[in-house]
Amino acid sequence: DQYPDPESTRNRDDTSFADGGRVPRMRPSPSKRSRPDDPAKNWTPGRRRMLVERFRTVPYPNWLGLKLAKLSAGQADLSLVISKQHQQYRGIAHGGALASLADTAATFAVLTIIPNETDVVTIEFKVNFLASMTGGAAIARGSVVRVGSRVAVSDVRVYGPKKDRLVMTGTFTMLVFPKPGDLTGPSANRNDQ
């Protein structure tokens, strides 16, 4: 028996081990008010208008040429018409352009259901490229897997011009955090400060 019994190595307070090592105490979870019990309750026509305006004013997706196709509770569909500027040296769609499309779809899917006083930022993603494409419209469908009080996860599928041709899949993890201020309208671009 080279491994000690876990119960014999713990002290009575369950936060330290017999060898002096300590297990950090977890901070209590934020208020359950920040966690959507019913995701659809945050989805309103006003919320949709706010997100459409927000999408319209974000520089990078617009520079890349992303288009918002559909928003519903927990889901966002975006498109990108692949042109020469989106291709890598072999003439196929650049993975970075498709990953940006997927990341934006994942983000807006989560934004449809999180509470108004919160925002998100991507902290990790994993994508799998399944097929190449040289042109036409890439369609990304972001769907929320889970939203917690601090972390949200979305899955994205990207399809090529033929609707049944799956080009890429991805899983996106986002940090959910309180908004630092009003970031809902055109004044959200604070570069002038």
Image: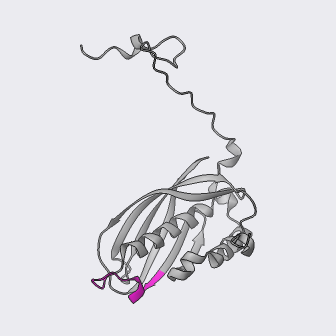
Residue interval drawn in magenta: 80-92
Residue nearest the observer in this picture, 55 or 192: 192
Q: Quadrant of the N terminus?
A: top left
Q: Is residue 82 magenta?
A: yes
Question: Is residue 145 left or right of 85 when viewed as pictured?
Answer: right
Question: Is residue 106 left or right of 134 when viewed as pictured?
Answer: right
Residue nearest the observer in this picture, 156 or 14: 14
Say which residue appears at 62% left-offset and 75% top-offset.
58
Residue nearest the observer in this picture, 127 or 39: 127
Give the vertical position of 9 relative to 167 (above or below): above
Question: Is residue 159 left or right of 41 when viewed as pictured?
Answer: left
Q: Quadrant of residue 82?
A: bottom left
Question: Residue 147: where, in percent of width, then height?
Answer: 57, 52
On the question of residue 92 being in view, the answer is yes
Number of marks drawn: 0
On the question of residue 83 being in view, the answer is no
Question: Residue 38: where, in percent of width, then height?
Answer: 64, 53
Give the vertical position of 109 relative to 133 (above or below): above
Q: Residue furthest left?
A: 1
Q: Quadrant of residue 133?
A: bottom left
Q: Is residue 79 magenta?
A: no
Say which residue appears at 45% left-offset and 77% top-offset.
139
Q: Quadrant of the C terminus?
A: bottom right
Question: Residue 182: where, in percent of width, then height?
Answer: 75, 63
Question: Is residue 15 left or right of 30 when viewed as pictured?
Answer: left
Q: Quadrant of residue 86?
A: bottom left
Question: Residue 111: where, in percent of width, then height?
Answer: 62, 63
Say which residue appears at 68% left-offset and 48% top-offset.
34
